[in-house]
Image (cartoon, rainbow, N blue to C red):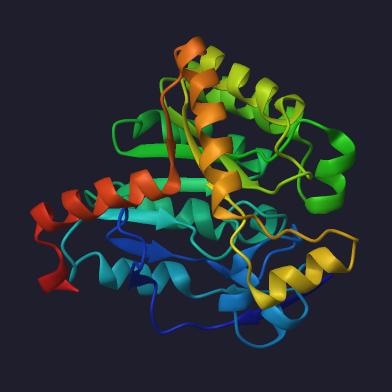
Amino acid sequence: MRVVEIRTSRGLARSGLPEYDYALNPYLGCLHGCRYCYARDFTRGEPGDLWGEVVYVKVNLPEVLAREVNALRPGVVGISTVTDPYQPVEAKYRLTRRSLEILLPAGFKASIQTKSTYVLKDMDLLFVYRDRVDVGVTITTFREDVARLLEPGAPPPRARARALHMLSELGVRTWIFLGPLMPGVNDGEGDYGPILDVARKTGSEVTLDRYRPRPGADSMLAAVGVEARPGRGWWAEKSREIKAKCAELGVVCRTAEEEWRAAREARRGRGLDEFL
């Protein structure tokens, strides 16, 4: 593992994801090193080339962000879109915590997505601003051997589930990102069934997604003997299967495509683009 401190000229960027107005990425690269991660293909230089081995830390992010919140219209900030905001280096640098301490009092909302239990270190802040935050936890399977293969540097799935329980009990809105699903790898009922049960117990909504092939991610999977080429027929059938199970459990469950369509419609009504 190698950590490189850098300086940045920008904190908030216009988000390419319709559910967010802004994206905030305190780090470049991710030490979780997930084999399937599309972010490698969108990360330039060492952090992308040596995915899981090198992370760049934007050490001046809080001071840049403090200026930006006075110049930009408040909106929904995706934390983070091409890195994990609570990966191991957050324990030292606390950039995610310090960013939230700037954004939330300024009227911005934060949508956090992570695989890390380190999010619990910010329970006090998330509780105070629970009307402005939501926390999504990615869980791809409950089978420990598959999780270790696909997500070598991330906390175990059951630890993530415990974090969801704790956040939900605080009154923080929680959700689960169930994906990326890959045929024959992590798409069986033994993979997703326990995750849906966690969603039921925590009142978490579920976003389903399939693996979307990218050259970097494909090569990382191939290196551990996984070839994931999901076909459209498979995904249509699999998503129906999982959504039927969600309906049985009373869990709100949507595919990523369905959420993106809804978010695009909602974004048109917010009129934020002119401010970016």
The one nearer the camera, 196 or 134, is: 196
Q: Residue 126 in the image: x percent, y percent?
A: 43, 35
Residue depicted at 80% across the width and 52% down the height: 150
Q: Is residue 85 left or right of residue 64?
A: right
Residue depicted at 19% across the width and 68% down the height: 72
Residue depicted at 45% across the width and 16% down the height: 247
Q: Is residue 258 above or below residue 230?
A: above
Q: Is residue 114 visible?
A: no
Q: Residue furthest front?
A: 233
Q: Is residue 168 above or below residue 185?
A: above
The one nearer the camera, 77 or 190, is: 190
Q: Residue 170 in the image: x percent, y percent?
A: 46, 20
Instruction: Please identify the quarter of the rendering in which residue 195 is found.
Output: top right
Q: Quadrant of the C terminus?
A: bottom left
Q: Is residue 213 visible?
A: yes
Q: Residue furthest bottom?
A: 45
Q: Residue 186 in the image: x percent, y percent?
A: 74, 40
Q: Residue 196 in the image: x percent, y percent?
A: 59, 22
Residue depicted at 50% across the width and 11% down the height: 248
Q: Quadrant of the N terminus?
A: bottom right
Q: Is residue 152 left or right of residue 94?
A: right
Q: Is residue 70 above or below residue 233?
A: below
The one nearer the camera, 247 or 21, is: 247
